[in-house]
Image (spheres, rainbow, N blue to C red):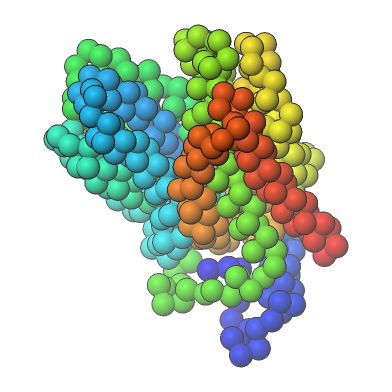
Amino acid sequence: MPNSAAGITMDTVNEKDIDDHLSTSTEIGSNKESEADKTKEFPRYTRYMVVASCFVIQGLACGVVHSWGVQQEYLANNVYTGDTKKIETLSYIGTLMFFSVYFWGMPAGWVAEVWSYRKLCFLGTLVMALGELLASFSKEPWQLCITQGIVFGIGIGMVFGPSSTAPAGWFTKRRGLAIGITVAGVGVGGLVIAPLTEALVRSTSVAWSQRITALYILVLGTISSYFVRVPKQDKTRSFNSFDWRAFYNRRFAVHTAMVFFVTAAYIVPYTYLPEFWVKHGISSQNASVLIAVANVASSVGRVATGFAADYIGVLNSLVLSLVVAAISCLVIWPFATNIGVGVVMALFYGFTAGGYWSLAPLAAAKLFGVEKLTSNSGTFYTVSAIGAWLGNPVGNAILNGPGHGTQFLGMSLYIGVLWFASFLMAVVNRASYSKR
C-alpha cells in the first residue's frame, strides 16, 4: 500500500531502501506538480464538483455522529429513565461510530484505489441509510448498538477516507484549500444535522427522526457519490498486490504515531468541556453555545489551515497547529472557568484541532506522494482506531480518580500531553523531510 515500487524484494528490504524510494517517488511527484503549476489544471467543473460532493458526504456521515447525542439524551431522559444499565449501553453507540470512522480506513482506502471511489461511496451511502432505517425499528439499546453503532459505523468507514482524500489529486496549486473545504463538511454537517435532529425528535420521535435521516442520506449521498472520482484509477493494481513495506519506513511509522495520539485526544474536550463549564457555574445553555463556537472555529480552521498550507508549507502548518492545540489544553483549559476564557479556549482548540484534519492528509501526500494517499491515510486511521476507542474512557477514568473532580486538571494534562506528543512526531518528520 505505500508508495513502493516493484524492484525491492522482501529479502533485501531495509530502512534506507524504502526511505530512498519513497523520497524519490515524492520528488518526482513534486516535479510534476511544479510543471503542472505552470499550465492549466484539470477542468474547473470536474474539480469543483468533486470537492462539493465530498463536502456533502463528509457532512452527512460525520454530522449524524455529532447529532447522536441529541437522540441519546432524549432516550436516556424519556424512554429509559432510571434504567442505568440501558443508559450505560447507550453511551457505547457514539464510541462505536467514532471508532468505525478509523477502523475501516485501511480496507476502505485500498478498495477505493483498486476498485472505484464512486462505487465505494455509493455502497457506503446505502449501508449508512440501512443502518439508520434498522435503528428506527430497534427497541433496546443493544439493538441500537448493532444498527446505529456497527452497521451505520461501517457505512461511515467506507465513505470517510475516500471522500476526504479524493479531491487532492485534482489540484496542484490549491490542494490545501481544496482539502480544507472538503473536510469542513464535518463541522458544517454537525451544525446543520444536530439542530435538525433535535427538531425532528421533539416534533415526531426518535424512530421517525432516524427514518427521515435515512431518507436524506440516501438521496443526497447517492447524488454526491456520482461525482466522487480521481483523475486516474490505476487499473493494473489488484487486491493481491497489497504491499506492507511502508511499515518498514521510519517516516511512515512516525506519521502513524502522530495520527494515533491526535485520535486519542481530539474528541475528549468536545465531550467533557460542557461538563467542566457547568461545574464551574456556567449555565448549560451557555456551555452549549461555547461548544457551538468551537464547532464553528473548527470549520473555519479546516479551511484556513488548508489555505495557509498552500503558502507556508503543509508540514510547517501542521507543526504550528499541533503545538497551539497542545497549549490550549495545557495552559488555557485549566483557567477557562468563565465565559470569557471559555470563548478563548473554544476558539483556539476548535480552530487548531479542526485544522489538523485538513493538514494530516496533506502531510501524507507531501511525505509519501498523492498517488496512494487514500490507502496510506486509511492505514493511519486503522492503526489509530484503538486511540479513538480509548480516548474518552481513559479521560473519564482520570476524571473519576482521586484528586481530580471538578478541577479537571488531570484530564487537561492528559489531553495536552497527547497533543504535545503528536507535535513532537510532526517535528521529527519535518526535520527528516528537510534533511532529505
Q: Residue at x 50, y 34 (%)?
A: 400
Q: Which sits in the foreground, 191 or 313?
A: 191
Is 94 above or below relative to 81?
Answer: below
* Farthest front residue in view: 402
* Residue situated in front as seen by the camera: 406 or 232: 406
Q: Which quadrant of the figure has residue 112?
A: bottom left
Q: Quadrant of the C terminus?
A: bottom right
> Which residue is pictured at 39% across the width and 35% down the height?
65
Q: How many marks?
A: 0
- Pick the residue in front: 55 or 105: 105
Q: At 59% from the left edge and 86% from the top edge, which residue is drawn? A: 10
- Residue 410: quarter of image: top right
Residue sitting at the far right: 435
Residue at the (53%, 54%) spot, across then down: 384
Task: Give the vertical position of 230 relative to 347 (above or below).
Answer: below
* Any part of residue 357 in sight: no
Regarding residue 24, the answer to whether it shows in the image is yes
Q: Is residue 61 above or below residue 348?
A: below
- Measured from the top left, where is residue 36 in percent x and y? 69, 52
Task: List x then y, in percent, for residue 225.
Answer: 36, 44
Q: Quadrant of residue 107?
A: bottom left
Pinpoint residue 261: horizontal percent, then vertical percent: 61, 49
Q: Is 256 left or right of 109, judged from the image as shown?
A: right
x, y (%) of residue 350? 61, 28
